């Protein structure tokens, strides 16, 4: 894929500060960015209870669907987001659930 058209929407991989992936997702949503944060649910069991926890599939990374201009601007707008992976775009599979979110099996 090429990033030559600055107005074209592409998916970018953003690196975030450790343990702040969910905070960055909240900020991205607040500022109107489309994003994808791969999370899976796991059941953790202790002797007295079970709890369902959200576990990151790719720690310290979040996918952002944006233009080249907004990609640069997001580094100033979004706290805890500190850089993007080079200038490469990444393919993301089509949405696979009726609610508009992607799903991961496993």
Image (tube, rainbow, N blue to C red):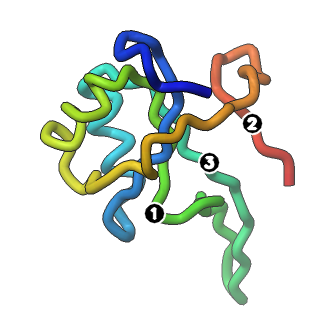
Q: What residue is rendered at 47% in x and 32% in y?
A: 35
- Please rate how many residues cluster around mark 3, counting C-alpha atoms within 10 Å: few if below 14, some from 14 to 19, many from 20: some
For this orientation, the residue located farthest to the right is 106
Residue hosting label 3: 38
Q: In the drawing, what numbered circle is on residue 8? A: none
**Residue situated in front as seen by the camera: 27 or 84:** 84
On screen, residue 42 above or below 83: below
x then y, percent, for residue 65: 47, 26
Helix, strand or loop under label 3:
loop
**Residue situated in front as seen by the camera: 103 or 59:** 59
- Please rate how many residues cluster around mark 1, counting C-alpha atoms within 10 Å: few if below 14, some from 14 to 19, many from 20: some
Pick whichever of labels 3 and 2 is earlier in the sequence.
Answer: 3
Report, in whole angstroms, how far the alpha carbon at label 1 lies from the one at label 2: 19 Å
On screen, residue 39 above or below 27: below
Helix, strand or loop under label 1:
loop
Residue hosting label 1: 60
For this orientation, the residue located farthest to the bottom is 47
The reply to whether callout 1 and callout 2 are in contact (CB within 8 Å) is no
For this orientation, the residue located farthest to the top is 7
- Residue 37, quarter of the rendered image: top right
x then y, percent, for residue 39: 62, 51
Q: What residue is rendered at 48% in x and 38% in y?
A: 12
- Residue 100, quarter of the rendered image: top right
Left or right position of 62 against 52: left
- Please rate how many residues cluster around mark 2, counting C-alpha atoms within 10 Å: few if below 14, some from 14 to 19, many from 20: few
Q: In the drawing, what numbered circle is on residue 103? A: 2
Pick whichever of labels 1 and 3 is earlier in the sequence.
Answer: 3
Left or right position of 87 against 90: left
Q: What residue is rendered at 47% in x and 16% in y?
A: 9
């Amino acid at each position: 894929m090429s990033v030559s058209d600055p107005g074209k929407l592409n998916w970018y991989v953003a690196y975030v500060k450790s343990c702040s992936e969910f905070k960055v997702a909240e900020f991205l949503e607040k500022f109107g960015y489309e994003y994808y944060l791969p999370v899976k649910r796991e059941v953790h069991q202790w002797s007295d209870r079970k709890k369902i926890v959200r576990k990151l599939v790719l720690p310290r990374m979040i996918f952002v669907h944006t233009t080249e201009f907004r990609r640069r601007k997001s580094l100033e707008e979004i706290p805890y987001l500190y850089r993007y992976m080079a200038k490469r775009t990444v393919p993301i599979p089509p949405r696979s659930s009726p609610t508009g979110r992607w799903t991961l099996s496993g």
